Image (cartoon, rainbow, N blue to C red):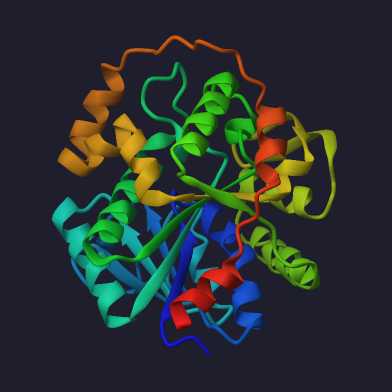
Amino acid sequence: MASFRVAVGGLGGGGDSGGALAFAIPLRRKGIEPVFIAFARCSTDTILRAEKYTGAVVKVTFSSWSSGRFFEPHIASLGFETYVICLKEKKRDVIDGLEKLVSELNIRIFISIDLGGDSLVFGDEPLLGSFRTDTLGLASLSTISENLGVRAYLAVGVLGLEGGGRDLDIEYLADNLVKLSESKAYLGSYRPPQEAVSEVAATMGYLLSREKSAMLTLYRDALLGKLGTRRYDVAYLHAEVCVKNYHGYFFVFNALKVCELSKLCKAAREGWSLTLKRVARHRKIRRLKTRRDLDKIAEYLLKRKFDLTKVLAELNK
């Protein structure tokens, strides 16, 4: 049994937290009960029937409610202790709330999930996806990693399929992956252990029966081996999407090192949402020196594995 807590949760709201079940359920099967801590584009007063923990943090139960695609009450109904970090609050309140959670719950590992890949944009690409919430979440995560020494991981699933593969420039994403690998920000690929896959998929199915998420639907299909091109009509996604083998894996990164390479993340850490908007609006597009193939790079990166069991053992010494 671990002497510390492991936090898992979504980086950008919506189905991202559902993706965290790929880590949470295997941990629970090992006898390690994770705590869910999700970042979301919200204010604390817009989440009803929730306990206010700090100025930017609420503790959610199965009876909590908020407008939009709010997955966290359904996660709480599975018996997980669940918190939401509201990124519309002031930066200081967000960081203070996170640091209080980490200290009081004795969290030493924090795994934050992004389905799609817009957390990996640097801020000099033609397309940025829905970057704002992800970037503010990543900035917060990297800050507590630096301040408190928490092992903070960014885990990206259904890589490149943001908006069905239309909201990110795939060649730039591929180029970013090479830079992340060269800088040693990339730590390896992760897939739930085979003995846990059916439970992970079934639990994700339960969430999807209650809230819609295009990215979580795509990840679940990839996890179950439902590969190939088919039409999806889920939430905002109405298009044909090609699901590939690597979409069923998470690509795991050191969150602090990702932030150090991102103009957007550094802007968010410096001045929060207003500075982030300004940097994104006035960005200069970098010229690619080499045209890279995302499929080939992703399949190459799959060869390196992220061993969560090993990480846990290291911290338990």
* Whole-percent x, y for residue 162 in the image: 58, 34
Which residue is found at the position 59% from the left and 51% from the top? 188
Number of marks drawn: 0
**In terms of depth relative to the viewer, which is nearer, 162 or 55?**
162
**In terms of depth relative to the viewer, which is nearer, 109 or 119?**
109
| Position above or below: 29 against 129 | below
In the picture, the quarter occupied by the C terminus is: bottom left
Indicate left or right for 244 with 174 as reference: right
| Position above or below: 3 against 281 | below
Residue 98 visible? The answer is yes
| Quadrant in which residue 135 is drawn | top left
* Whole-percent x, y for residue 142 in the image: 31, 52
Which residue is found at the position 52% from the left and 59% from the top? 17
| Position above or below: 276 against 201 | above
* Whole-percent x, y for residue 117 in the image: 53, 38
* Whole-percent x, y for residue 183 in the image: 43, 38
Which residue is found at the position 59% from the left and 32% from the top? 163
Which residue is found at the position 38% from the left and 53% from the top? 40
| Quadrant in which residue 107 is drawn | bottom left
**In terms of depth relative to the viewer, which is nearer, 8 or 50?**
8
| Quadrant in which residue 145 is drawn | bottom left
Residue 168 visible? The answer is no
